[in-house]
Amino acid sequence: MADKVLMKGNEVIGEAAVLAGCRYYFGYPITPQSELPAYLARRLPEVEGVFLQAESEVAAINMVYGAASAGARVMTSSSSPGVSLKQEGLSYIAGAEMPCVVVNVVRGGPGLGNISPAQSDYWQATRGGGHGDYRTLVLAPNSVQEMADMTIAAFELADRFRNPVLLLVDGILGQMMEPVQLPAPTTYDINQKPWALGNPNPRKGGRNLCSTIFLDVEQLEEHNWHLYQKYQVVTDEFAKGAYKHLAVETHAVDDAEIVLVGYGIISRILKTVVEKARKRGIKAGLVRPKTLWPFPSQVLADLAAKTKQFLVVEMSCGQMVEDVKLAVDGKKPVFFFGRTGGTVPSDFEILNEVDKLVRPD
Amino acid sequence: MGKDVEEIIMAGFGGQGILFLGKILAEVGMAAGRHVSWIPSYGPEMRGGTANCTVVISTTPIASPIVQEPDTLLAMNRPSVARFQPKVKKGGTLIYNASLIEGEAWRDDLNVIAVPASRIADELGNAKVANLVMAGAYVRHCPFLDYQKVLADLPKVIPAKKVEMAEINRAAFVRGYEYQG
């Protein structure tokens, strides 16, 4: 194992992609993720890969579509407004079932917003984002180390399910440096996917085709239900615990009278809140969804039987809170606290909310 | 081994090497076997206004790397004092660049240390190493960083292409460490 190195989150995603066998990156710079393309612009040529700064985000995501069709491990990255531009291509990629990794280092919106950290793209990430009935897997790391581990996991999941996988990271994680232990490189063979272009397909007249055009009504309906069934398989495998290490983290929940729920950088602030609350005699616990789709609903459903209430904290006006409410299913009250516009809530103000809920007098 | 967690905010003009100063402290903290985190301000201030950076050095894994009340403030210019002095923890440490900051109203519940970092850097012939003077001053007042070890690690932390630069870096760090008002 290599020694730990101090690296920036954005750069770690780039290095982890290379270690996962990704040799193609297409993107367009935008703060707060520009260190990622900058890193790969230098790094990919060293491993005979292709780095291409496209003329736009729209072009970049369609280049990803092309490289994925050819069987390559491929990545693009952007931040919120740029990821909005990629949604059309993402819909095509999901429809054509092309594996790829898309990184969103989230900043404030809507519109141009600002470059400060935010979590307001949760709905866009977990609900598809583009048009049509489709899903993308969404991973949400909370440390630089996890940005390495989850980037590699994202490529594996993408290939496993022939589906785009999103890495949802906020601006702080992208910008921060922490020690990271980089994993060993994996070798990836571009010719290993039988469905990819260039490989023979006896059933379809001799050659593979990667397409989203189904002009025939019956054919498209069949394709839609096929995708649906695939998403069911993804959900089932996560629910059965096949990706336990990737799905969810819990902390001090067994005796918790209030369960805090948060992902990404917020989950780390919440851990501090849990520690401080317990020092005050408040039995607080933490659930951190690490995978946002499929959402780790069962853990929350189980806790609904034990705890008294939930408090969801996000850097948005309240998006993931809807998934928590669906999971808790009305069995216990679910409250929300959020800050937006680039404001990161302090542990003080969250602790204050916890206090108010636990001791309403 | 000293205290468990040390939270540091450093701030100054863009171009004073604030983010790099933070990186140096994170690297030496890591070399001392501690958990570390480094968060820059990455906003428009990067383009010439004020820059600040947060470093946490901890014996245990760092939960929240966001710092509300730092133990220590390293202030390189006046706006940094105005912005961050009120946030420093009671009984905390404030080290300031006395070459550019004077006449401030200092809190009486802080350990306030004046270091003429810019003047020392100028004397060494390179205004850019004022951040290393501050790093030296910080190590002097940090309860758990070992001066000799940090000095030995310095060339790894700041790879200098030229020998003269490596010497100036080292001299700036030593002058900061040895400075007594």
Image: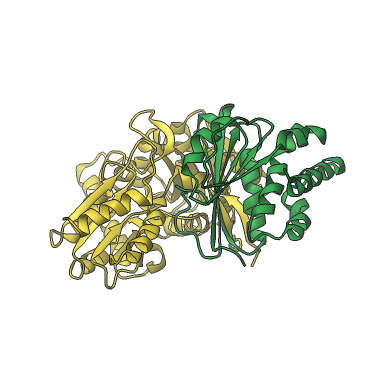
Q: Position of residue A131 (x, y in %)?
A: 28, 38
Taking the view exactly as shown, the residue that stands out farthest to the left is A330
Please tell me how many numbered marks the rendered image carries.
0
Chain identifier for the yellow-coloured part of the image: A
Residue A225 seen: no
Q: In this rendering, would B67 be left or right of A220?
A: right
Q: Position of residue A52 (x, y in %)?
A: 57, 36
User: Which quadrant of the figure has residue A39?
Assistant: top right
Q: In this rendering, would A307 be left or right of A180?
A: left
Q: Nearer the viewer, residue B83 or A88?
A: B83
Taking the view exactly as shown, the residue that stands out farthest to the right is B163
Q: Is residue A1 above or below residue A315?
A: below
Taking the view exactly as shown, the residue that stands out farthest to the bottom is A254
User: Which quadrant of the figure has residue B79?
Assistant: top right
Residue A117 seen: yes
The colour applied to the residues of chain B in this rendering is: green
